[in-house]
Amino acid sequence: VLAVTYDHSRREATIGGYEAESGAAPQLDRGRAGIAALVGMAGRDVAFVPSASAALAMLLDVWPLEAGDEVACLPGEYGPSLTAFSQRRLRIRELPVDQLGRVDLDALGAHLASHPPALVHLTQVPSHRGIAQPAAEVCGVCRSRGIPLVVDAAQALGQVDAASGADVVYGTSRKWLSGPRGVGFVAVRPPTASKLRIPVDEGVDVRSEPSPVQWLERSEGHVAGRLGLSSAVDEVLAAGAAQVHERLAALGRLTRTALDGIGGWRVVEPYDEPTATTTLVAPTGVDVIGTRTRLRVAHGILTSGIDRARAPREMTEPVLRVSPHLGTTVADVQALATALQG
Ligand SMILES: *Cc1c(COP(=O)(O)O)cnc(C)c1O
């Protein structure tokens, strides 16, 4: 990924950005097709965008919504997405969940029937808790009610199966795909794409306009990053996405069993949740952000301190997040357990 990103930047410097980009067109097509394979769509349904947040902002700008319309999501929705909804004066409706914040599928159909929202926005794996939401099942319920489903796969892609059947899936390069920062993607199924309110520039012949989804991919962008993301996706596909997901789930199980109860820290997820993301609630009187800093400075172990702003409607206290990736070893997890104790 690093070599691909570097090589393209060098070509931009030597032959010029536009020339370098047109020479890379086949790899960019392959990248869109790779992302499409992971989300269960076609390459032409995929656009590169600057980040997952940019994808949501761009979508909301062209989605047929009016101020006052309702967006339904889970109480554990990502804080910045809630802000994006309220900034556009959309009302937020919470869908029914169980104690862990997992969508209650039995109650969902009746809920959507009695309060049909303009769209359902589902964060498939939240950033504050390693729960994999049953996105394919949610998609089935939404489809049977004719309600569009938009899935935030920023924490899901590369970690769990993100081919849910949703109308829109968007995500980012820099998380579980380990691609470069500054690039993400949005994938929109054609029937939904045809409903987007894409502005037509003055003086442009609409017959030669690209498809609505391609419009979301602005001509100016981080092309080296798009190629880096494409290469990261290629690596996942070459390794076998299912094998990557299985291995990450095994690392999650290993991490949760090794850490639960250590020094009074408590694991939030069920041990067998098919994700690697592990979150820990601090023992009384222990500061999460201070612990995060201590682990990094004194032990060279990188974790994340997750504050309430990540999921303000669900979180009551900060948690410490551990995100073991494919390179994490049993010894690494044991070192963390020892460091947490001290
Ligand atoms: C990180 C994250 C985002 C935003 O991704 P960016 O690419 O940084 O904009 C959106 N949703 C969730 C659940 C995230 O964890």
Image (spheres, helix red, strand yellow):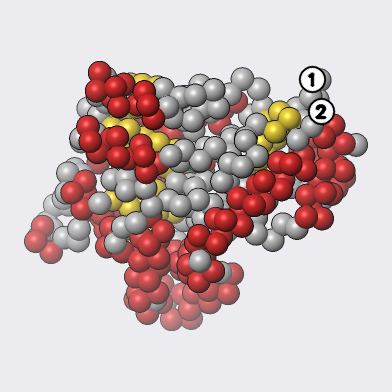
* Residue contact between numbered discs 1 and 2, judged by CB atoms under 8 Å: yes
- Tell me if mark 2 has few (under 14), some (14-19) or many (20+) residues whose alpha carbon lies within 10 angstroms of its own: some
Residue under label 2: 264
Residue 7 seen anywhere in this rendered image of the structure: yes
Q: Which residue is nearer to you in this view: 234 or 90? A: 234
Of marks 1 and 2, the one in the foreground? 2
Ligand 1 is within 8 Å of the C-beta of the residue at disc 1:
no
Q: Which residue is nearer to you in this view: 163 or 123? A: 163
Residue under label 1: 284
Q: For this view, does 123 lie left or right of residue 274?
A: left
Q: Where is residue 103 in the image (x, y as percent from the top left)?
A: 44, 30
Q: Which residue is drawn at 25% across and 51% down?
A: 189
Ligand 1 is within 8 Å of the C-beta of the residue at disc 2:
no
Residue 9 seen anywhere in this rendered image of the structure: no
Q: Residue at x 24, y 38 (%)?
A: 143
Q: Residue at x 59, y 69 (%)?
A: 2
Q: Which residue is nearer to you in this view: 42 or 200? A: 42
The CA distance from mark 1 to mark 2 is 8 Å
Q: Which of marks 1 and 2 is nearer the N terminus?
A: 2
The N terminus lies in quadrant: bottom right
Q: Which mark is residue 117?
A: none
Q: What residue type is disc 2 on?
A: Gly
Q: Position of residue 342 (x, y in %)?
A: 90, 36
Q: What residue type is disc 1 on?
A: Thr
Q: What element carries label 1?
A: loop
Q: Where is residue 113 in the image (x, y as percent from the top left)?
A: 24, 23
- Tell me if mark 1 has few (under 14), some (14-19) or many (20+) residues whose alpha carbon lies within 10 angstroms of its own: few
Q: Which residue is drawn at 79% across and 20% down?
A: 284
Q: For this view, does 226 lie left or right of residue 192?
A: right
Q: Which residue is nearer to you in this view: 149 or 290? A: 149
Q: What element carries label 2?
A: helix
